[in-house]
Image (tube, rainbow, N blue to C red):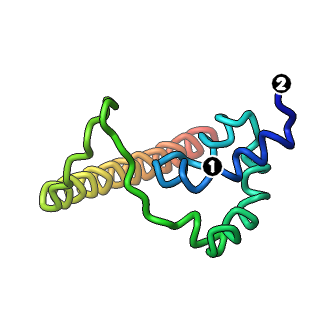
Amino acid sequence: MTTKHERTIKMMENFVYLHNKGHSVGEIAKMYDLSESTVYRHLGEIALSVDMTRGELLKRHFTADHSGRNFTPVKPVDRSKLNGDFAALMTEIESLQAGISKTIEDLEIYNGILEEEIK
């Protein structure tokens, strides 16, 4: 069985390769049975070993190999439909607000009538 120290060293040796393959920090941590905080703690050393900053290492664009994976690409957003849906929702919200305001007014009138009756 490998010790945590050995797993950390292996993770540090393979981080850039795995990250470039598309694995997240969390996934890499799981692969080596380490916590994400342990991986993040060593990112500075890893970045230094490949002559980068920690930020550059994490922002590095990678191309993942998705062959053999089942995934559905995200469809592009139809902006005109989105704008139309938003406008329709805003109209519905305004209508609901008007209904609520009318109900409050009716309750105030009703409460006024009750107060008059009680006196």
Residue 114, image x and y in percent? 55, 40
Camera-nearest residue between 103 and 30: 30
* Residue 33 left/right relative to 71: right
Residue 50, image x and y in percent? 62, 69
Q: Residue at x 26, y 50 (%)?
A: 92
Camera-nearest residue between 27 and 119: 27
* Residue 20 left/right relative to 9: left
Q: Residue at x 46, y 48 (%)?
A: 21
Up the image or down, 100 lies above or below 31; here it is below
Query: Which mark identifies residue 14?
Result: 1
Other-residue count near label 2 (Cα within 10 Å), few / some / many at <14 / 14–19 / ≥20: few
Q: Residue at x 54, y 52 (%)?
A: 17
Give, as a three-letter code, the residue at label 2.
Met
* Residue 11 left/right relative to 89: right
Other-residue count near label 1 (Cα within 10 Å), few / some / many at <14 / 14–19 / ≥20: few
- The C terminus is located in which quarter? top right
- Tell me which label, 1 or 2, sits earlier in the chain: 2
Residue 40, image x and y in percent? 73, 56
Query: How far apart are the two marked residues, 1 and 2, measured between alpha carbons?
Result: 19 Å
* Local secondary structure at mark 1: helix
Q: Residue at x 48, y 54 (%)?
A: 20
Res. 41 image quadrant: bottom right
In the rendered image, which residue does mark 2 sit on? 1
* Residue 12 left/right relative to 81: right
* Local secondary structure at mark 2: loop
